[in-house]
Structures are given as C-alpha cells and as structure tokens.
Image: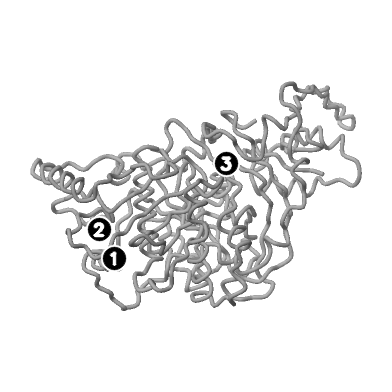
Amino acid sequence: MAAGGASPSIVEFFGGEDGYRCGYCRSDTGNLSHGMWAHSMTVQDYQDLIDRGWRRSGKYVYKPIMNQTCCPQYTIRCQALHFQASKSHKKVLKKMLKFISKGDVSKVASEEEPMDSHIEDAAACDFPCKSESQVSQSELTPLAVDHTERVENEDKDSGETKEEVTVQKVGSDSLQLCADKDTTVPAEPSQAAKAAHAPPKPGKGADLSKPLCRKAKDIRKERKLQKLLQHQMGTMEGSQLQGGEQTFLLQNSKSKTNQPKTIEDFVFVSLPDDAQHKLEVRVVRSSPPSSQFKATFQESYQVYKRYQMVIHKDPPDKPTITQFTRFLCDSPLEAEHAPNGPDCGYGSFHQQYWLDGKIIAVGVIDILPYCVSSVYLYYDPDFSFLSLGVYSALREIAFTRQLHEKAPDLCFYYMGFYIHSCPKMRYKGQYRPSDLLCPETYVWTPIEQCLPLLEHSKYSRFNQDGKAVDEGRLKELGRVRVLHKRTVMPYSVYKKRRKGPSDEANVQQYASLVGQTCSERMLLFRS
C-alpha cells in the first residue's frame, strides 16, 4: 500500500508507440513517445514521474522519446519564490488592473505568446484515444488486504538460495481506484527528490521564503490598507464558498518602498469604490469533482468550446463534452491531504477566473508535493485583449507562492514542456529564473546554460559532467511491483507464475523509464 493508507498507483504500460502527428511542426508521424494509462496515481508518484520527463493528458501519461522525436520537449520549471516579473509581464498586469478599475480596453496585442496549450501535442493528435485502457475495473481491484501470502522465490537456473518474498493480496474494500477519504498522506519522497526540490541555501541568493526587512512606516501603511480592504470587499482571502471551495480575491496588497513591484503588488491591490469590474479567482477540485465543479461544469465547457473553435479553429462538432472531460477533467491523481500540505489538498483542480459573475478563463492545474503544475488554459476569446495566457501564468506563480506559506516544500511552478525547436513555444523561457530537465541524468539545469546547447542541436544533454548518470535508474528488475490476477507481487515472483512468451523486455523498458523508486511503489498491471 502507498504511505498513509492511500491507494497505490496502478498503470498499464503501452511501450514506444508508432509516430503520431506533431502539434508543433505538423509532422504526420514525427511525434514519438512512450505512454501508459494511469488508472490511479498518487501525487508523489506523479511528481517523481514529471521529474523524469513524463507528462499527463487526462489519464494518459506520456514521455517523449527525446533523441528521436521531431520536436524534443524539455520539462521546464520556474523558481516561483525567486520569480521577478519582466517589463512585458508588468504591462499585462497593469492592463488587467486598468480594465478592472476603469473599464479601459486596450486592444494592443501582447508581445508574448499566450501561456496555453501545454498539452497541445496530446490534444492535437489521437494517441490517448488509441491507447485508452480496455481493462475492466474488477481486474484492477486487488483482493482482500487483511492477509499476505508468503511466496518462496526460487531461481533454479542460478542455484541461489530460496528467498522469501511477501506478496500482498489486495482487497476491493480497502484498495479502491479512487481514495474515499481526504486524509490520505502522500508517499514519502526519496532523498534525491528532496534535494532536487529544496529551496536555495544561504549564499545562493535571497531566501524569498522569509519576509523582507521592512520599515515601521510600511507596516503601519499595510495594516491601514488591510482594514480598508476588509471593509471594501467584505470577504477575505481563503473564505469558504458553497461547496467548501477556496476563493482568492483581489486583496492583501503589500507596500514595499524601494522594492521592485511583485506580481502580488499588481494582483492583490486596493480597488476604488467605483471599480468598473470585479475579478474573482476560484480554485475548484476537478477530480474527484467537487460540488462547485459540478455546478459550473456546463458554463466551463462552453468557454472551452468557444476557445477551441476561435483560437484553435476546431470545427463546431469537434470540441465535444467527451473530449473536454477526457483531456481536461479526468485525472488519475488521488485527492490527498497532509498536515504540512496546502489547505485545499493535493491533486487536480480548475482555477476559474470569474469576471462580474461569469467564467472568462480556466487554468487546469495539478497541485503536487513540490509544485503547481500547469496543464492547460482555455479562455473566452472575447477577452483575448487581456492577454489571459500570460496573466493566468503570473497568477499561478503567485498561487504557488501562496501555497508555499503553508506547504514549505511546494516552491516551483512547472510550465509543461519547453520546445526550443519550435519558436512559438520559446516564450516559456521568459519566466525567469527557470530550469530545464536534463533528458539523460534528470538533473535540473538553469535555462541560461541550456540555450547555447539547444541553438547547436535540438536534442541535447544538459548535464556537462560526462561521468554523471541517472541516479534514479533501474537497478533491480525483480523488485518492480506487478498487479497480476488481482494480486500484488514483485516481478521476480510474477515471472515464474507467468504463462506464455516472456514480457521481460517490456517490463524492463517500463521500469527504466519510470525509475527504480516509482517501479517499486506503483503497480504495473499484467493481464
């Protein structure tokens, strides 16, 4: 079982598929990736997977074959605690502020690409549909968990001594595909993972997790402003909406003399009494769907449909409810809570932007142990002039910083994939400081060091230590966990029980791609 009683991740691995259409360069068969269907997944497993170059589209989890695919896709993360808004970012924030307070409508096009379509390659091709699981839920529901079966693991060929292995028989009551309780605790990360996500040490730059030294005058000014906001807005940050959802309003501005303006200075600002508009951002759990998510589903879908038709030129019959649900609502992630985690918990959410009581944009996000991971954004095309792609990315960075105050480990904002070979997708590199993931050693490298390498070759190893290897690589195939005939067992036992041709090459490939840690925690379904 996963730590804290959470259901373990259950996956079906499909291996390296044939080439699919690429959403970036439009090649018909150049998009190459490995894929697996995730029936359920813990947030720690998914965090560890995206730190090895995986990404999800609905319940389909895929990893580009980096040295073969037409447009190599490098996982990119922004160091949210150290993020400094650029001039063009501030222009977008000011534009929104002017629109809300005065109704000003600036039709000037944004200098940056919108922060959307993080799963464009998945949405633009049909590999998730082709690879959808056909396995029934009963096959995935392990047997009773109240006892374990001891199995002797004999390796007759090598003549080794008998090894006693514990095989768990898992049950339909205690091990379900979705967690029934909200109190499950994420699995314990490995030491290497903790090190990779630790906030910067002293001497490595300002520790933005600690407050800046401030003058008494500024503190008095802030208190006065907070009282004013309480009176003006009536509802303070973190108030409970119907359905127990958290709402984050435009408020809680902090005045910093002689400091560069932060996102928060633009977003949580005092508005005039005669403000023309009201913008509210609500975070609603999409999987399992909360009451607030269900209540707003149809309105949200209509925004998605218009977005796809106008921005991506989809025909009217293409953006179906099924497609919307499969790609942007379904998620394998368990809803998990931890004592030192965010109040809203971990898992999959929709961040809804409400303008004057109507949804104008939705950011699809995953909240994971170390990061907020951006999945997709769609918005009402009538509000394109507000540069909602950039605005939502900046709000998600601010949201990451907000969650960090309650969950100290959560300090990164993952922006999906950075694709240097596609000029349209380079805008993600403008959210600094940011790092790219080395496709061979899975070590994070500052983007400034990566760009010269990518200018030279679209596929590049970023780790310049030639002797460095993947520290999380597969070391023991026999320890890979398998779910076979509703029984959990190590691969060493399954291999002896299996009838028919060997599947060792397939299991070896799977375990090499997910790494030793995940291969020992997740359950690989075998029919």
Q: Which residue is drawn at 35% across and 58% down?
A: 394
Q: From the top left corner, tell me how far across and down residue 409 is, in percent.
A: 42, 39
Give the residue at mark 3: 334
The quadrant the N terminus occupies is top right
- Image quarter of residue 483: top right
Give the residue at mark 2: 266
Is residue 451 rendered to the left or right of residue 51?
left
Out of 344 and 216, give the one closest to the viewer.
344
Tag 1: residue type?
Met
Q: Looking at this view, name the residue that lies furthest to the left.
A: 217
33 up-or-down from 424: above or below = above
Tag 2: residue type?
Phe
Q: What element carries label 2?
A: helix
Asked whether disc 3 touches disc 1, contact meaning CB atoms under 8 Å apart, the reply is no
Q: Which residue is drawn at 49% across and 76% down?
A: 310
Q: From the top left corner, tell me how far across and down residue 57 is, in percent.
A: 59, 57
Could you tell me how far apart the alpha carbons at marks 3 and 2 are, in whole angstroms?
Answer: 34 Å
Is residue 441 rendered to the left or right of residue 356?
right
Tag 3: residue type?
Glu
Asked whether disc 2 touches disc 1, contact meaning CB atoms under 8 Å apart, the reply is yes
Is residue 135 rendered to the left or right of residue 94?
right
Q: From the top left corner, tell me how far across and down residue 116 is, in percent.
A: 47, 65
Say which mark, if any, is on residue 96: 1
The answer to which of marks 3 and 1 sits earlier in the sequence is: 1
Q: Residue at x 50, y 71 (%)?
A: 306
Could you tell me how far apart the alpha carbons at marks 3 and 1 are, in whole angstroms?
Answer: 35 Å
The answer to which of marks 3 and 2 sits earlier in the sequence is: 2
Q: What element carries label 3?
A: loop
